[in-house]
Image (spheres, rainbow, N blue to C red):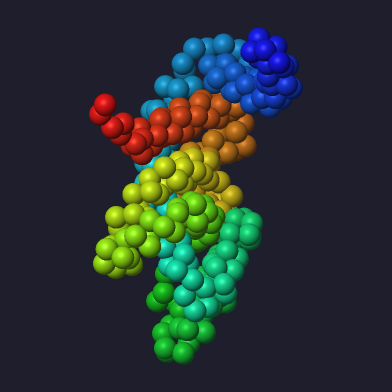
Amino acid sequence: MNTKNKKIWIFLFTIPCMILFALVYAVPIITVFYTSLCDYTAFSSPAFQGIKNFITIFSDSDFICSIRNTLLWVVLQSTIHVGVGLAMALVLRRKPKGWKFARTAYMIPNIIPTAATGVMFTLLLNPMFGIVKPIMDFLGIDYAMVPNLFGNSRYAFWTVTATWILYSGFNTIIFLAEMGAVSKEIYEAAAIDGATPWQADRYITLPLMRNVCGTCVTLASVAMVSQFDIIYMTTKGGPGTSTLNLPIYLYKAATLENNYGKANAVGVVQIIIGITLVILIKGLFREKKEAA
């Protein structure tokens, strides 16, 4: 088969994928961008009005707060969440005693739906009847003196964060897969030269994890830009705006205000933030080309 015929067949086989992409992603995204410039509700057809929706949301202090909370969660997820996954991978790679049990136990939270996780933590941390109550009874503390961690604006953000930040089993699997691809001969040569296990990890393993670390950071960041269910099930963005993020703000604009144009404007901001984060992370973790 010559090169020309090969290109034709490649094009023909990619047509179904391009059609599916256009129907599932391209058309909805174009629709979101267009309707974000319209006066659009459930009871009226989209009527073009320019950038009025964007002026409205950027004039709203709640929207600015939702961006701040979203970006803070992105930073926490990209550092602590991914860092915990990498640390667990480094430990499990050495296969210490009980490593199979630890690996399985660490993955369990990741197979539980996040909405169910939110409900579970809401019940567990309830000072009236959750796991907190018997602990307080044992310590002789009056439950009225203990704040509702999800209902107090001082603690809500960090309590919600704690419900997922340490459950990075998916990242651990990715790191373990990448570590398994590293030739054992490299570690054997390092051991012969007198390198300790820590030095081998520092100078061999970690530098080779650069690309996959960028992948994990990208996935973690994008997930935080679209995080909805666990926040909605625990605090619904409250109390006040302490846990309000972009998806919750969008949800409230669409359902409570019945303003689809405003909600889609928020969606456009989400898309732009997501794309910007992917570009920045890709540049941050890009390997430097060696000079010729």
| Above or below for 182 versus 119 | above
Tell me the quarter of the image containing the C terminus. top left
> Is residue 88 or residue 221 the one in the foreground?
88
User: What residue lies at 49% left-to-right and 12% top-to-bottom?
Assistant: 50
* The N terminus - image quarter: top right
* Residue 259: % across, % down: 58, 28
119 left or right of 95?
Answer: right
Viewer-proximal residue among 37 and 31: 31
Residue 200 coordinates in the image, percent (x, y)? 32, 61
Seen at 38% across and 60% down, the residue is 187
Residue at screen point 38% across, 48% down: 208
Residue 85: quadrant of the picture: bottom left
Q: Where is residue 218 in the image (x, y as percent from the top left)?
A: 45, 41
Residue at 70% of width from left, 12% of height from top?
A: 5
Does residue 257 appear to the left or right of 186 in the view shown? Answer: right
Depth check: give the residue in front, 231 or 133.
Answer: 231
Instruction: Report if residue 162 is visible in the image.
Output: no
- Left or right: where 103 falls relative to 21: left
